[in-house]
């Protein structure tokens, strides 16, 4: 007998964020086809009610069990682990291929049949299968129009749903009835907590991946653009960096603005957020009052660091950001020991954690020099206040007043 057999293929579960993709390959027995009355009942699985789908599924299974089956089908499941490994497109192809291979085996095992085989797939994927002599025909949105495609989609969908029902009891707080593992708002809300990601979620899918890779925030006090470069780059690997600009010690204001502008450039290049605090220069003069004549790295500088670190810690507390640190750790001109004392003091008050990283070490300072050259970032050549030893035009002498 020389006949043509059309195998129809459809899948279920391509778009949800969890569990497997299921493919069904199917053909109706040309000699003993399902009744016209039954075929009339078949429709796109998405248009049928859950109850109707299940009834039709049961009937289709029953028909395939008969001595002279009315249909032949095979279902193949590719789970979320494989999906994460090879991607959903390839996983879908594999599910289709394996279900096809099994249906082809059924046909070829019948020695009386030497049919020409044509495969029709619902979708636009254009997969090519080595097991077929001819490339499948791809059709779109035929679920409700061809009874075989409707039957394949019902079998794949109900088969998958039955597997998922078992998970409803394992994950009762997932509110499965609200999202059925699809990318709904409720499902996204549920996933905002990484500890709630289940073993059947597709971890390679963006929303799941983003939650898994979600980083702790860190508030990074910035003293200037060049010194910010290495800390931003290094911290970005493990944290979501938010830069915090508070440097009213810089004079004149023009110089302050110039350095702030350079920081904005760095933030733009590195795609990090920043918060700009006001230029309350009077606060600086107040804080160092009486200490203006002390040498650099001594008392006035300690007050200057403290003013900025205190403000940063307050902001971290306000924003609920536990981790914080400062780019003051980059410059070779600063006294790290003094800053260590300061961070301990401010961290304790807000239950914060100051990251004790000496950014200037391991070539950090040199890296920042190279970065600023490459991106044309302005690098200042004097410390920031009018009382610094390197202030252009000479260090100003402060009036001799005691604090
Ligand atoms: S010399 Fe630099 S660190 Fe010291 S007080 Fe002036 S601006 Fe602050």
Image (cartoon, rainbow, N blue to C red):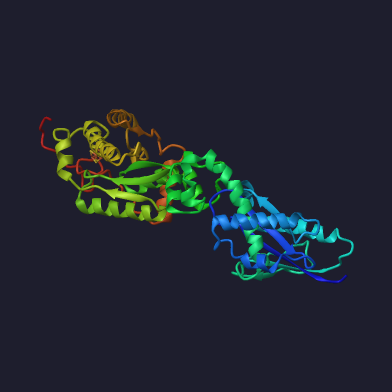
Q: Quadrant of residue 40?
A: bottom right
Percent coordinates x, y for residue 347 in the rendering: 31, 31
Identity of the residue drawn at 66% across and 70% down: 138
- Judge whether 137 appears above or below 162 on screen: below
- Which image quadrant: the C terminus? top left
> Is residue 252 something that shows in the picture?
yes
Percent coordinates x, y for residue 400 in the rendering: 11, 33
- Please tell me in which quarter of the rendered image ligand 1 is found: top left
> Is residue 213 something that shows in the picture?
no
Counting labels gives 0
- Which image quadrant: the N terminus? bottom right
Q: Nearer the viewer, residue 338 or 81?
A: 81
- Judge whether 76 appears above or below 291 on screen: below
Is residue 184 rendered to the left or right of residue 170?
left
Is residue 161 rendered to the left or right of residue 268?
right
Is residue 317 rendered to the left or right of residue 7?
left
Identity of the residue drawn at 70% across and 65% down: 8
Q: Quadrant of residue 269?
A: bottom left
Q: Nearer the viewer, residue 147 or 320?
A: 147
Is residue 7 rendered to the left or right of residue 372?
right
Q: Nearer the viewer, residue 119 or 43?
A: 43
Percent coordinates x, y for residue 193 in the rendering: 44, 42
Percent coordinates x, y for residue 17 in the rendering: 53, 51
């Amino acid at each position: 007998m020389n006949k043509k057999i059309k195998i129809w293929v459809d899948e279920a579960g391509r778009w949800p964020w969890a569990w497997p993709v299921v493919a069904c390959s199917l053909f109706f027995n040309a000699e003993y086809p399902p009744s016209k009355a039954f075929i009339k009942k078949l429709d796109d699985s998405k248009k049928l009610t859950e109850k109707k789908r299940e009834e039709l599924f049961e009937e289709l299974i029953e028909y395939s069990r008969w001595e002279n089956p009315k249909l032949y089908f095979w279902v193949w499941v590719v789970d979320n682990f494989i999906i994460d490994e090879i991607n959903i497109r390839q996983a879908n192809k594999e599910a289709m291929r394996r279900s096809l291979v099994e249906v082809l085996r059924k046909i070829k095992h019948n020695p009386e049949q030497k049919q020409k085989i044509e495969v029709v797939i619902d979708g636009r994927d254009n997969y090519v299968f080595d097991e077929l002599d001819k490339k499948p025909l791809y059709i779109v949105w035929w679920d409700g129009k061809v009874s075989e495609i409707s039957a394949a989609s019902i079998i794949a969908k109900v088969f998958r749903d039955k597997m998922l029902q078992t998970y409803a009891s394992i994950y009762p707080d997932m509110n499965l009835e609200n999202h059925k593992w699809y990318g709904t708002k409720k499902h996204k809300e549920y996933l905002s907590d990484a500890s709630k990601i289940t073993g059947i979620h597709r971890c390679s899918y963006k929303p799941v991946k983003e939650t898994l890779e979600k980083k702790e925030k860190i508030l990074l006090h910035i003293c200037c653009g060049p010194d910010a470069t290495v800390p931003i780059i290094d911290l970005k690997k493990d944290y979501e960096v938010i830069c915090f600009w508070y440097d009213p010690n810089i004079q004149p204001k023009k110089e302050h603005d110039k350095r702030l502008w350079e920081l904005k450039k760095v933030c733009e290049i590195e795609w990090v957020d920043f918060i700009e605090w006001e230029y309350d220069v009077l606060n600086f003069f107040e804080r160092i009052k009486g200490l203006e004549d002390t040498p650099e790295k001594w008392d006035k500088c300690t007050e200057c660091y403290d003013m900025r670190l205190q403000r940063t810690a307050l902001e971290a507390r306000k924003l609920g950001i536990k981790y914080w640190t400062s780019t003051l750790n980059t410059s070779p001109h600063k006294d790290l020991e003094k800053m260590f004392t300061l961070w301990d003091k401010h961290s304790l008050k807000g239950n914060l954690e100051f990251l004790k990283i000496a950014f200037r070490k391991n070539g950090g300072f040199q890296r920042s020099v190279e970065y600023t050259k490459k991106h044309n970032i302005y690098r200042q050549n004097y410390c920031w206040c009018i009382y610094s030893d390197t202030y252009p035009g000479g260090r100003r002498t402060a009036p001799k007043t005691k604090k």
